Amino acid sequence: MLSSNPLFLFRSRYVRAIFVSSLFSQLGIWIRNFAVLLYVVAETNGDALAVSLISVAEYAPIFIFSFIGGVFADRWRPKRTMLLCEVLSALSILPVFGALESGSEAWGVVVLSVFGSSILSQFAQPSGMKLFKLHMSEEEAPLCMSLLQTLSSVFMVAGPVVGTWVYQQVGVRAALLIVSAAFLLSAAALARIPADERKPRKDAPREAAGRRSSIMQDMKDGFRYVIRSRSLLMLSLCFAVIGLGVGLITPLGVFVVTEKLGLPAEGLKWLNIPYGLGEILGGIAAFGLAAKIPPQRLLIIGLISNALGIALVGMSSALWLTMAAQFFVALLQPAIFIGNQTLVMQHTEPAYIGRVTGIRSPLMTGSMLLMMSLSGALKHALQLEALYGIAGFCFLGGFLMLIPLPQSGNHRSGRPTR
């Protein structure tokens, strides 16, 4: 039985190490992202192409390397992989200093450094999920997920503020030094995790040769595993449909302010403030309730609540009601990610957790970016009420995909036959 107090998790050396590592890693990522953004804007006089390359450097690795990173996460030892990725992310700052000291235009090198660090993240993330699977029980996993989601929610609000403040106070050189130190501290925290288990191998040379020749087979097996497991397939499609809804409305907030509420564009802050507060409180609430509410029910509550809240944002013409709807949406959003990810872990065998994670990440990000690119054209064709209604139906569609799923605990393997 789990303790009624979720803070009991911090008695675990593993949980403490993962939490501290995530704290420093998030700090480094947010400072890096905003220091790089502001530096490139200053160096290029706001050149749109240069600024857009930063987004390419952050998002392109998700599509190119996410599944590859998942394959190798299933092959390599997860602790060592994460440690190496954090150390290499810290070292990726060194070429930037060389370019800065040379006096040449360094913004291109800065963007390449972000690209390299983003690639490393695609190897570290699935390895982190594998560590969860190996070290945490099914009862503890939702609590750990909610703990990290709370941390992520805090940084979603505080990260841009901290990153901007650091750059303005100390400049790009010192900011990048802080980033490098944060990644090294993250690696130091990971070093406290128990060592990866070494499995004895009698025919190591022959097995190594077989492994080198079967990477493509591992990739195929990963896709088969997800497709043949109804639970994993539906949860992954649910994640993609949610991404469609989020991507559709992400660029439209300013139009809600100007067209629905009749405020100047600067009034967007009145939507962001309750949203940020809701995310933080929602993460804290999910951390307290994750042990008491089954993940499937948590996910359903989050999806239905977000569907209603998003539709209400599109229909409301009163500032107080729109702010309340924004708060309501953000408050229940952590439940979606915690519930979905916990269910995926429950329905995935340890040998496949890296590949399953690597398949899911591009689905969510790709669907978001697709709809973000189309939302402008759709805005010219449809009213805001219709667009927010469609986004709400995306969340409702995610809920409908959960209906055929077995109840939590009734796990079915999707292991392919070789």
Image (cartoon, grey):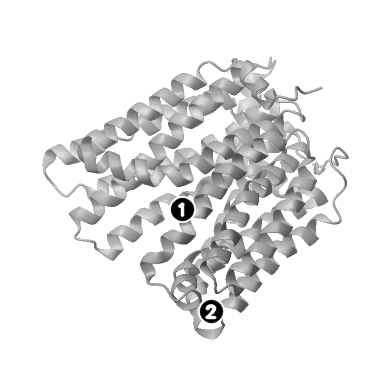
Residue pictured at 28% horizontal, 39% vertical? 166
- Say few, some or many: other residues with alpha carbon within 10 Å of mark 1 (under 14 / 14 to 19 / 20 or more): some
Q: Is residue 26 left or right of residue 1?
A: left
Q: Which residue is mark 1?
A: 59
* Vertical relation: 47 (above or below) 37: below
Inter-mark Cα distance, 1 to 2: 23 Å
Residue 204: image quadrant is top right
For the residue pair 224 and 334, the one nearer the viewer reads as 334
- Say few, some or many: other residues with alpha carbon within 10 Å of mark 2 (under 14 / 14 to 19 / 20 or more): some
For the residue pair 356 and 323, the one nearer the viewer reads as 323
Residue 75: image quadrant is top right
Tell me if I can see residue 161 in this picture. yes
Residue type pointed to by label 1: Tyr
Q: Is residue 191 left or right of residue 182?
A: right
* Vertical relation: 347 (above or below) 60: above
Q: In which quadrant is the N terminus drawn? A: top right
From the top left corner, tell me how far across and down residue 218 is, in percent.
Answer: 67, 41
Residue type pointed to by label 2: Leu
For the residue pair 415 and 396, the one nearer the viewer reads as 396
Q: Residue furthest left?
A: 103
Q: Earlier in the sequence, mark 1 or mark 2?
A: 1
Q: In which quadrant is the C terminus drawn? A: top right
Disc 1 element: helix
Q: Is residue 8 left or right of residue 174?
A: right
Residue pictured at 60% horizontal, 41% vertical? 283
Q: Which residue is mark 2?
A: 378
* Marker disc for residue 126: none
